Amino acid sequence: MIILIDSGNSRLKVGWLDPASPDMPREPATVAFDGLDLDALDRWLTALPRRPSRALGVNVAGADRGAAIAGVLQRHGCAVAWATSQPTTLGLVNCYKHPSQLGADRWASLLGVLSRLPGTHPPFLLASFGTATTIDTVGPDNVFAGGLILPGPAMMRNALAHGTANLPIADGQVVPYPTDTHEAIASGIAAAQAGAVVRQWLAGRQRYGEAPQIFAAGGGWPEVRQEIEHLLADTGGGFGAAPVPIYLNHPVLDGLAAMARANPAPHA
């Protein structure tokens, strides 16, 4: 078994791939832990039906967190290889000025989306709403064109509460014309996230001459989904078709699985 690990800023997601079976099956459901709860990772590894042979992961939570995860895996006889962004992987081309500086989780997520698509596909963008929101675009030629990074919904809310004297941690509805502070903050956050998505969708449509498909991911998606879908419907209607985002549960692990399937044997 190959363990798949997505070590993010707040959550640790894990899965597995079985290279011994012809179709290389995956875990029935991804498991997520608090990023600091490495005892939970240890218990999960202990409960696996077979001892893992190796692990493949991405880690954006810092070197100390990566070393701690590696230590838990080592106790189960499993070494981890941390994937990094490359100039090209599995046909996906990285147009970052310095390819290695692209977040490894963003790169793996895009590979995860590509693993779901046929060889001929429209351009797409992946909007991931985590601690940070990232909105990345890939063309029909499998070239990653670039993307945005902005604070995620929870970070925006906390920044307003902690960076001002009188604003609360908002718990309000998203409405067109807010009439209290909680509504105003919730609606402002959703509007900012939706505006960034629609900006990139319009930029992609202009760049490629066709409407990009939209994929969404991350724990912040439920908070902003309605606003994004409404704004896309209003904007897309002017072009004859309103895009509907497709939510993906774990594109990072999907991308790692694609890489593992391409190289199922352990490194020498």
Image (spheres, helix red, strand yellow):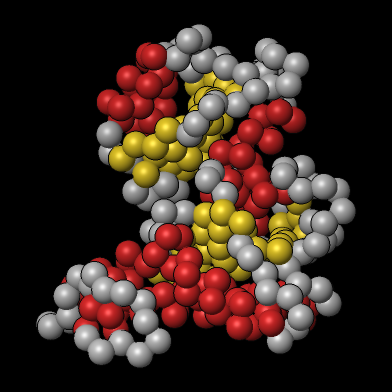
Position above or below: 190 against 90:
below
Residue 100 visible: no
Evaluate whether residue 30 shows in this view. Answer: yes
Residue at 40% x, 19% y: name it. Answer: 45
Q: Quadrant of the N terminus?
A: top right
- Name the spot of residue 75 as percent of width and height, x first: 37, 15
For image coordinates 28% across by 80% down, the residue present is 183
Q: Residue 160: x, y in percent?
A: 25, 77
The percent coordinates of residue 215 (x first, y second) are 62, 58
Q: Nearer the viewer, residue 39 or 267?
A: 39
Question: Tag count in the figure?
Answer: 0
Q: Position of residue 233 (x, y in %)?
A: 61, 77
Left or right of residue 25: residue 48: left
Q: Is residue 196 left or right of residue 207?
A: left
Residue pictured at 77% horizontal, 42% vertical = 90
Q: Quadrant of residue 182?
A: bottom left
Does residue 168 lie above or below 54 as drawn? below
92 vs 252, nearest the viewer: 252
Query: Which residue lies most toward the left here?
Result: 165
Res 98 → quadrant: bottom right
What residue is at 22 percent from the left and 86 percent from the top?
Answer: 180
Vertical placement of residue 240 versus 41, above or below: below
Residue ranking furthest to the top: 50
Give the residue furthest to the right: 120
Looking at the figure, which quarter contains the C terminus? Answer: top right
Is 29 on the left or on the right of 36, as rendered? right
